[in-house]
Amino acid sequence: MTVDEIKNGIVLDHITAGKGMKIYNLLGLDNLECSIALIKNAPSRKMGKKDIIKIDADIELDTEIIGYIDPDITVNIIKNGKNVEKKTIELPQKLTNVLKCKNPRCISATEQELPHIFTLADKEKRIYRCLYCETKA
Ligand code: ZN
C-alpha cells in the first residue's frame, strides 16, 4: 500500500502494530484539518508489521504521550519532501494530564484545579504512579 508522500509534516514510523489508532486518538489528530494517513499493519523488515501515521502539517506533537504509548516510535520531520530530522523518543519521566488517577480518594480526583501527574516508577516494566497517592496507572 502506498500513500502520497507529504511535503511538510511529520511521519510517525515504527509504531507497534495495533497501537496506531490509540496514538491517533490520544494525540487528538481527528481534530486537525490537514490530511492524515493512518497505515495499519505495514510490512516491516525489523518488526514484521508496524503502523505508520503521516501528518501533512508542521505541528507540535506531544512527545510525552507518544513516549508513554510506544517509546520505540521514530518521529520523522519532513520539509520540502525531504526527511530532515529523525527523532527517537524516550519513555517520559513524568506524564502531565495524560492519565487520570483511578483512586477515588486521591486529591487529584477531588481538587479539580490540580493537574494529573504521574511519574515513572519502574523503567523496565514501564510502571507509572500517581504523584499524589502513588496509585499505579
Ligand atoms: Zn492519585
Image (cartoon, rainbow, N blue to C red):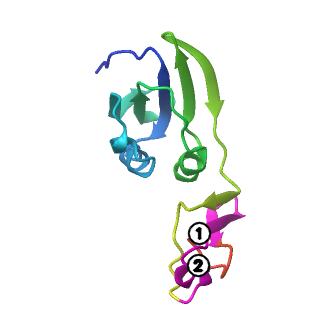
Tell me which amino acid carries mark 2. Answer: Ser
**Image quadrant of residue 39?**
top left
Give the image location of residue 96, x and y in percent.
61, 60
Disc 2 packing (10 Å; few <14; some 14–19; many ≥20)? many
Does 102 appear above or below 77?
below
Task: Quarter of the image for the N terminus: give it.
Answer: top left
- Residue at image coords 50%, 9%: 80
Q: Which residues are magenta?
A: 105-129
Task: Quarter of the image for the C terminus: give it.
Answer: bottom right
Tell me which amino acid carries mark 1. Answer: His
Disc 1 packing (10 Å; few <14; some 14–19; many ≥20)? some
Q: CA distance from mark 2 to mark 1?
A: 6 Å
Image quarter where ligand 1 lies: bottom right
Of residues 122 and 110, the one nearer the viewer is: 110
Q: Is residue 108 magenta?
A: yes
Tag 1 residue: 116
Disc ID at residue 108: 2
Q: Does the beta carbon at disc 1 come under 8 Å from ligand 1?
A: no
Whichever of labels 2 and 1 marks the residue nearer the N terminus, that label is 2
Q: Does the beta carbon at disc 2 come under 8 Å from ligand 1?
A: yes
Give the image location of residue 11, x and y in percent.
48, 27
- Residue at image coords 58%, 78%: 108
Q: Is residue 47 magenta?
A: no
Query: Badges 2 and 1: C-beta atoms under 8 Å apart?
Result: yes
- Residue at image coords 48%, 23%: 9
